Image (cartoon, rainbow, N blue to C red):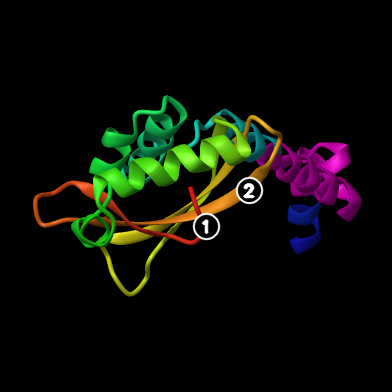
Amino acid sequence: MEQRTTTRVAARMPAFLRGGVGVATVLAGVLVVILLVVIVARALTPPPAPNAAEVTAKQFYTAIQHQDYPKAWGMLASQQQAQLTQFAFIRFAQGQDQKYGNVTAFHELRYDADRNQAHQGVVQMQVTRANGLKYAVGLTITLTADGTWKILEEDHAI
């Protein structure tokens, strides 16, 4: 009697599922479909919006590119401004422009949040000058008490 039950169940199963190869083929097909759905979903997901520190870095280099040095100096943290007057900053920036040409392009390479200080991070920027010089600059950006993001230091001259 048990043999009849097994025969009846097997008779109701489609032929391709009766063998182990058929089941494996169906499972492989399902996995491929799931994988394709995941790949397409990731490709269609827009990149995350830049955070405020990244926006500050881009605004700083936009000001430098447009030679709006007072605006760029105003984006420095008070510690930076205490060490470098606005006049000295402008003269330095103009000297960089004379030596290497104006900033013609820039883009963000990456953002690294500081794991030890929640309100600080480093934005790595790629800068291109008119003479073709390209260099990377790491801008350490910090959240100030008034809620604005300011540039605390650079690891390379602007």
The answer to which of 78 and 59 lies nearer the viewer is: 78
Q: Position of residue 82 (x, y in %)?
A: 20, 60
On screen, residue 94 versus residue 81, left or right, reads right
Query: In which quarter of the view is residue 145 placed?
Result: bottom left
Q: Is residue 20 magenta?
A: yes
Q: Position of residue 7 (x, y in %)?
A: 82, 50
The span from disc 1 to disc 2 (Cα, nearest Å) is 9 Å
On screen, residue 139 versus residue 26, left or right, reads left
- The disc labelled 1 sits on which kind of residue? His
Residue at far bottom of view: 116
Q: Which residues are magenta?
A: 8-35
Badge 2 crowding class, 10 Å Cα cut-off, few under 14, some 14 to 19, many 20 or more, is some
Mark 1, secondary structure of its residue: loop
Tell me the tag on residue 156. 1
| Callouts 1 and 2 close, C-beta under 8 Å | yes
Q: Residue at x 41, y 36 (%)?
A: 58
Q: First in sequence, mark 1 or 2: give its number.
A: 2
Q: Residue at x 53, y 36 (%)?
A: 97
Q: Position of residue 17 (x, y in %)?
A: 82, 44
On screen, residue 74 versus residue 57, left or right, reads left
Query: In which quarter of the view is residue 77 placed?
Result: bottom left
The answer to which of 148 and 18 lies nearer the viewer is: 148
Q: Is residue 25 magenta?
A: yes
The residue at which mark 2 appears reads as 135
